Amino acid sequence: MNAPSDQRGSLIRAARPTDLEALVSIETSSFSGDKISSRSFARFLQQPSSRILVAEVADFSIAGYALVLLRRNSRKARLYSIAVDPAYRGSGIGTQLLGAIESTVREMHCLELTLEVRTDNTAAIDMYQGHGFVVSSTKPNYYEDGTGALVLRKSFSTFVPGQLNARSRVPVVLVDQIGDLPEKLPVGRAISISDYLQMSHRSPGRLVINLARSYEHLTHGYYASLLAEARGERCYPGAYNLLDINWKRIHLRALNELSPVLEAAAGKEPFPESMLFFFGESPDPRFRELGQLLFDRFRCPILQAWFGMDERPVIEDIEALPVTRLASNDRSRFVAALTSFLKSRHPVSDRLPRAATSIAILVDPEEERPPSDAEALERFRLAALDIGARVTFITKKDQHRIGLFDALLIRTTTSLDHYTYRFARKAADEGIPVIDSAENILQCTNKIFLYELLKRHGIPTPETTVFDSHQLDNVCNTATWPSVLKVPDSCFSLGVFRVDSPDELRARAKQMFKESDLLLIQSWVPTEFDWRIGVLDGVPLFACRYFMAKGHWQIADNEADEGIVYGATDTLNIADVPADIIDVAVRAAKAVGQGLFGVDVKQTSRGPLVIEVNDNPNLDGDVEDLVLGPDLYRRILSSLTHRVGLPVGLPVG
């Protein structure tokens, strides 16, 4: 049965004594035997060794529950029962409850969660195994009707693909009094700040809109934003934003920086003394960019800006307003802006659970040589379904929407002076995990930075010299021939040239110095192929051999008469790759940090040499995924979903 049509997701909270009747009703409708009685539920609600979480839907009814038992002086927990009202099955509530229980168990410092499931309940067994549970034993004749049970176990001591963070797809709108909003929201759930502060359950990645009457330091509004960030939820405004807007010296500096945007928007036309911006939206299209910049800077749902003239238009001040101070017509406009902001996620497909983690994949449909082809992108989409997530493909026009997703995967070629770097920075500002991070882009896309980093960590590389135009003559006298000359910021073998003599070096370098003040020259290491070792969070992921293009010294011949020509590739099991190649690749990736990397290694008689570490490695269908198949994509997306709600930059594992 499908969920009711007005179902907008559920809010997970701790059960209360007033939920007893609903718990018994769900139990009765879900099980024919081995039912928990009303008296037992009442006892579980009171016992400190048990936790009952419920899923509350839009009409405040209970759609499901999960009961976990904790053992005294033990780091093991037992999922005693989980059930969803038949009317709400298929809406993702079971997955959401399971994720909530896992979060609760980890917060209680438990290392293991066990459960029993009927041996004939294949759907439940598949679901649990899909989320990382493994069979540990069996119990014959366990249930009243004589059916046996499988005992499933999940360890939390280390990360495994499929591990859940509890997530709610229901945005929460916080108000001091429910009546502060003029009407019922068509999206999200309005709850009082006092109820939110008392919630014992967190939902990492959930969207929280704080509409407190006051954001002053140490007020309820301030603590609501502070607690949301501590819980790993994405709050507007965040605690740091409140400090910025309440600290006049900081926000006046920001206004001085934005005043030229006001001047450009106003032009010669008259402009108002003040303006209200709702989630950065302006009633006057001239000031749309200014509104978006103010929202990006302060993340306040309602901002009033005052304008003036000081030889040129200037922003004199701003204030974060509560909804209760808006005029009635402005309140209606605000509710419309709030609804639009909350609805800006793509509609959830019927195939996807409402509790699915929302992953944005940044692509460029016009890119000639993207890091993932169309087949690989489709496999990412299917892999997301396998791990209880959903994918939305976004482009460079969607930077303002980043905060509405749980995670970001960049699958277009990265560069520093480029929108991909700005997307990665924006994701970090929003507190959402991203592959590739801004730090990784910085470290990998500039070959000088990377060379110095690898040298500091003792990673073997070809003999390398960094030089400027004043050192060109000296390099011409000391280099060995042939050598490889590189622009620091380059990719896909572009900006990389083999030079066979001092005269050729001088000619190439003079042209390249027009683009960069520094260049690199490396000794040429001729090999039949380059190793490409994919490393994810410090663990080898795939291994390929990229062979040189026919008649060329690189894997890609960019100057062939027939267009770009690539060499052959083959993909190997990690176990079949020489151990020293894997070791140096993993060390090089770890020197850069956590994330997804492609490490290029030359296999020589002197041992392996690292050529470079790529932050945005190629992942094409039937190439890098030939050994792992769909599991390659599942592992990458699981790495992202595991980080949802964790501080950005926290190591995985």
Image (tube, grey):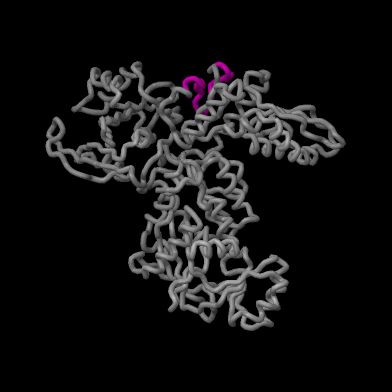
**Residue beneath the point at 59% across and 73% down:** 558
Q: Is residue 459 one of those drawn in magenta? A: no
Q: Is residue 362 placed above or below 329 in the rendered structure?
A: below
Q: Is residue 136 left or right of residue 384?
A: left
Q: Quadrant of residue 65?
A: top left
**Residue beneath the point at 49% across and 65% down:** 458
Q: Position of residue 422 (x, y in %)?
A: 62, 49
Q: Is residue 584 left or right of residue 616?
A: left
Q: Is residue 104 placed above or below 433 in the rendered structure?
A: above
- Residue nearest the viewer, comparing 73 with 55: 73
Q: Is residue 363 placed above or below 67 in the rendered structure?
A: below
Q: Position of residue 229 (x, y in %)?
A: 51, 34
Instruction: Examine the rendering and report whether any part of residue 393 can be seen.
Output: yes
- The quarter in which the N terminus is drawn is top left
- Residues in magenta? 179-196
Q: Quadrant of residue 448?
A: bottom right
